[in-house]
């Protein structure tokens, strides 16, 4: 239905089976339970399994669980393979910095994680076998053989861009659509073609500039929480939206209750970008760990991704068990104040209704000569 007659862009709506132009973002780390992914699909949206931290058998299990709940299509998402991290200059500093936090949670002293082998090929193989209809990735561009293998399965391929140049590179690499990730977005920055600071473009500025620069459909992402945000980004030329934070407070989302509460009580200025949890920049609600780690000392006390992620995992796991939100990575976008607690089906239905109402109201008011209801 959305195949754009004016530009002959391939139809994202048809390929993803969308009744509503709403994609539930991959929420790596446990947010996107199979129940959430299935409920979003059943409601006429499209759900992703964020599989970046999953082993191949876990990817297979998650896909099986989604398929047990729904016959609707779903996606699998991975991180593009990264070059092996540099050997830390001063691992002792990173361990010493975390030792008091480990102790506070009743854990033994932190240990330097062993560098993990590149898991991407086996994860990709599991994604190809999963029965998913779409494959998305972030943090870079996956190898051309991977894109070819995914397409050979008839799967729809989406890559993540935070700048126009990244979007052009992704289109050249053969993706079917581009997720334009604005700086408001919760979770890790997808920036891969330069320092993350150079990819901090707000969604309203980023989306139309990417739409003008590429021929494939663009999915808007970052700070979109309700039908007003969806209508706004459709007006900017997006074919659909990808929303993360809004789905994290759904009943089916797998994050700890204290994390949901933190989102539901947060204000628009509550989030910051931090490297402290994983070694890669990511947006989350500022808590004690983020604030104290940001205070230094120096810059060699945070290991490169994914070593820092492995180093803080025991901390985050213990904090989750003990309901200590001061040590959790509370990934969330700047739209937090608009978050609601509800079942995913209700959220998707509400978003669809609000989008339609917003577009109709704007159209009617424009025709009448008033800009909007308050204007
Ligand atoms: C908890 C969490 C986990 C995320 N995991 C992934 C992921 O695995 N892959 C990915 O491409 N994006 C991931 N994202 C980013 C989303 O794709 C999206 O860019 C972001 O959620 C949009 O901003 P919003 O949270 O304001 O809706 C994650 C976001 C959050 C909040």
Image (cartoon, rainbow, N blue to C red):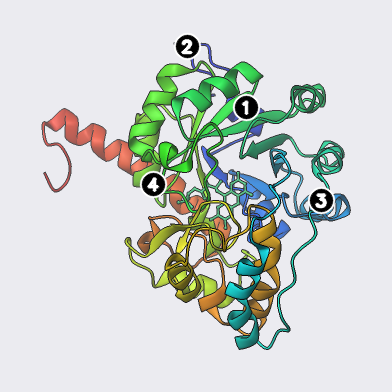
Query: What residue is at 48 percent from the left and 12 percent from the top?
Result: 5
**Which comes before the other along the chain, label 2 or label 3?**
2
* Numbered mark located on residue 14 in the image: 1
Residue 341 in the image, given as x and y percentages of width and height: 48, 68
- Give the vertical position of 123 relative to 258 (above or below): above
Nearer to us: label 2 or label 4: 2
| Structural distance between the alpha carbons of marks 3 and 4 | 32 Å
**Which comes before the other along the chain, label 2 or label 1?**
2
* Numbered mark located on residue 227 in the image: 4
Residue 199 in the image, given as x and y percentages of width and height: 44, 37
**Which comes before the other along the chain, label 3 or label 4?**
3
Q: Secondary structure at mark 4?
A: helix
Q: Can you tell which quarter of the image residue 131 is in?
A: top right
Residue 215 in the image, given as x and y percentages of width and height: 51, 15
**Which comes before the other along the chain, label 1 or label 4?**
1
- Give the vertical position of 357 relative to 64 (above or below): above
Q: Can you tell which quarter of the image residue 197 is in?
A: top left
Left or right, 80 with respect to 297, comes to right
Nearer to us: label 1 or label 3: 3
Query: What residue is at 41 percent from the left and 45 percent from the top?
Result: 183
Query: What residue is at 58 percent from the left and 63 percent from the top?
Result: 277
Query: What residue is at 64 percent from the left and 81 percent from the top?
Result: 102
- Which quadrant: the C terminus? top left
Q: Which residue corresponds to mark 2?
A: 7
Q: Which residue corresponds to mark 3?
A: 59
Residue 313 in the image, given as x and y percentages of width and height: 69, 68
Q: Secondary structure at mark 3?
A: helix
Q: Nearer the viewer, residue 282 or 357?
A: 282
């Amino acid at each position: 239905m959305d195949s754009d007659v004016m530009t002959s862009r391939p139809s994202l709506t048809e390929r993803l089976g969308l009744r509503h132009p709403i994609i539930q973002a991959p929420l790596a780390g446990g947010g996107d339970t199979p129940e959430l992914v299935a409920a979003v699909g059943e409601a006429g949206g499209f759900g992703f399994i964020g599989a970046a931290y999953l082993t191949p058998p876990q990817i297979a299990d998650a896909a099986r669980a989604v398929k047990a709940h729904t016959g609707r299509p779903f996606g699998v998402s991975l991180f593009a393979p990264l070059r092996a991290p540099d050997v830390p200059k001063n691992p002792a500093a990173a361990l010493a910095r975390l030792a008091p936090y480990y102790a506070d949670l009743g854990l033994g002293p932190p240990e330097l994680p062993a560098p993990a082998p590149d898991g991407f090929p086996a994860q990709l193989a599991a994604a190809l076998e999963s029965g998913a209809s779409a494959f998305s990735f972030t943090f870079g561009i996956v190898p051309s053989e991977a894109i070819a293998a995914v397409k050979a399965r008839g799967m729809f391929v989406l890559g993540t861009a935070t700048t126009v140049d990244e979007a052009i590179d992704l289109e050249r690499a053969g993706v079917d659509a581009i997720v334009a990730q604005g700086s408001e977005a919760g979770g890790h920055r997808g920036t891969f073609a330069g320092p993350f600071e150079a990819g901090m473009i707000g969604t309203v500025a980023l989306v139309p500039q990417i739409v003008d620069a590429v021929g494939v459909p663009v999915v808007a992402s970052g700070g979109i929480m309700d039908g007003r945000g969806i209508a706004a980004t459709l007006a900017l030329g997006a074919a659909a939206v990808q929303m993360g934070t809004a789905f994290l407070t759904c009943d089916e989302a797998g994050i700890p209750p204290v994390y949901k509460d933190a989102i539901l009580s947060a204000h628009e200025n509550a989030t910051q970008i931090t490297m402290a949890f994983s070694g890669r920049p990511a947006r989350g609600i500022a808590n004690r760990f983020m604030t104290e780690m940001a205070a230094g000392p120096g810059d060699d006390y945070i290991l490169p991704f994914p070593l820092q992620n492995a180093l803080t995992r025991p901390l985050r796991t213990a904090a989750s068990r003990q309901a200590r939100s001061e040590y959790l990575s509370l990934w969330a976008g700047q739209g937090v104040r608009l978050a609601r607690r509800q079942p995913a089906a209700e959220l998707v239905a509400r978003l669809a209704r609000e989008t339609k109402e917003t577009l109709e109201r704007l159209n009617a008011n424009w025709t009448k000569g008033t800009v909007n209801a308050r204007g």
